[in-house]
Structures are given as structure tokens and as C-alpha cells.
Image: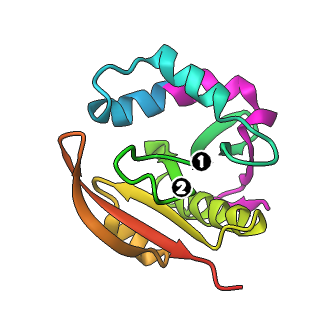
């Protein structure tokens, strides 16, 4: 569902599978943002992962926010995110908003979209981990599951249960 950035532009959230031209830029953004969590990663690997996570009807699904030809951000619904917590599924992952568009509702809209999509697929609870955005997700109704150490970083695992 489209929403406004507060200026004259409308933002659409859609599947990355419908906008594959955004994969190279998104791979670069994701690599720059999270390479420290995966030291052996590369932009080429991120391109491959995004292609693999470009499902249309079931996870892994990648959603993007865009305004016309401009990519604004992303969020994913995937089965597994942390190899240390295999009991949790599915996961909200890859929530990223381009710096110029932060604090304008794009990240919230993407995260909420993924939660709704998960509920539509029969998942009432979704998980995430974050090294730095605990406050952001708490404001969106996510609850802390635990604080832990993952890949040499302190992270918070959170969950969101959709009440139907």
C-alpha cells in the first residue's frame, strides 16, 4: 500500500522480485551496513543472497520501498537468520533505509509490512536480531527475547506477535 514521504512523492512497497534492477544497489547497501557481522562476505555474495531471497509467495521474501525509480529501503521475511537460534522462525531481516530517507516512516512501513505478510502466511510470531536498533523496534511493538553475543557483536533478539 502506497504512502507519502511528506513531500510530493509516493512510496510503494513491493517485492524485490518485481524490481530486480535494484539488486546491485541493495547488495552494496547491505554489504556496507552489515559486513562486520560476516567478515568473509562480499557485494557479489550479497547479490547472490538477494537473488535467492527474491521469492514471490513464501519465504524467503524481500520487500523494497521505492519512489518511482529511486530505491529507498528494504526488509526481508526469511526462515532462518541466526545459526545459533534455529528454534525461531521466521525472521524479519535486512531492514535498511537509505540515510537520506531515514526518520520519514520508511523503515516502520517496511517492518510492519513484513509482519502483516508473515501473518497472512500463517506466522503469528516473527523474530529479529539487532545490534543497534532495539529502541526503534520497541516503538513498533517488538519485545525483547534475549540479549546475546553473535558473531563477536552484542545483539538483541526480539519478537513480534500479530494478534488476529
The reply to whether the C-beta atoms of the residues labelled 1 and 2 are less than 8 Å apart is yes
User: Which disc is residue 43 wearing?
Assistant: none
Question: Farthest residue toward the front?
Answer: 87
| Residue 6 in view, yes or no | no
Mark earlier in primary sequence (1, 2) = 1
Q: Which quadrant would residue 4 be assigned to in this image?
A: bottom right
Q: Give the range drawn in magenta.
A: 1-27
Q: What element carries label 1?
A: strand
Q: Distance between the residues labelled 1 and 2?
A: 6 Å
Q: Mark 1 points at which residue?
A: 76
Question: Farthest residue toward the bottom?
Answer: 164
Q: What element carries label 2?
A: strand
**What residue is rendered at 62% in x and 78% in y?**
162
Q: Whole-percent x and y of residue 130?
A: 35, 55
**Placement of the N terminus among the 4 image quadrants:** bottom right
Q: Is residue 22 magenta?
A: yes
- On screen, residue 3 above or below 60: below
**What residue is rendered at 49% in x and 42% in y?**
98
For the image shown, how many numbered marks are present on the structure? 2
Q: Seen in the image, is 57 located left or right of residue 140?
A: right
| Residue 93 in view, yes or no | yes
Q: Name the residue under label 2.
A: 92
**What residue is rendered at 48% in x and 60% in y?**
88
Q: Seen in the image, is 98 located left or right of residue 50?
A: left
Amino acid at each position: 500500500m502506497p504512502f507519502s514521504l511528506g513531500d510530493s512523492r509516493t512510496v510503494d512497497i513491493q517485492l524485490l522480485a518485481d524490481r530486480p534492477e535494484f539488486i546491485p544497489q541493495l547488495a552494496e547497501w547491505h554489504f556496507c551496513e552489515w559486513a562486520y557481522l560476516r567478515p568473509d562476505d562480499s557485494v557479489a555474495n550479497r547479490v547472490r543472497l538477494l537473488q535467492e531471497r527474491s521469492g514471490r509467495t513464501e519465504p524467503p521474501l524481500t520487500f523494497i520501498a521505492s519512489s518511482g525509480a529511486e530505491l529507498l529501503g528494504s526488509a526481508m521475511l526469511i526462515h532462518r537468520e541466526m545459526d545459533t537460534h534455529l528454534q525461531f522462525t521466521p525472521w524479519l531481516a535486512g531492514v535498511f533505509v537509505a540515510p537520506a530517507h531515514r526518520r520519514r516512516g520508511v523503515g516502520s512501513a517496511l517492518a510492519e509490512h513484513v509482519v502483516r505478510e508473515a501473518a497472512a502466511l500463517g506466522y503469528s510470531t516473527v523474530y529479529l536480531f539487532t545490534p543497534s536498533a532495539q529502541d526503534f523496534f520497541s516503538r513498533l511493538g517488538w519485545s525483547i527475547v534475549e540479549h546475546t553475543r553473535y558473531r563477536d557483536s552484542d545483539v538483541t533478539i526480539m519478537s513480534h506477535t500479530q494478534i488476529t
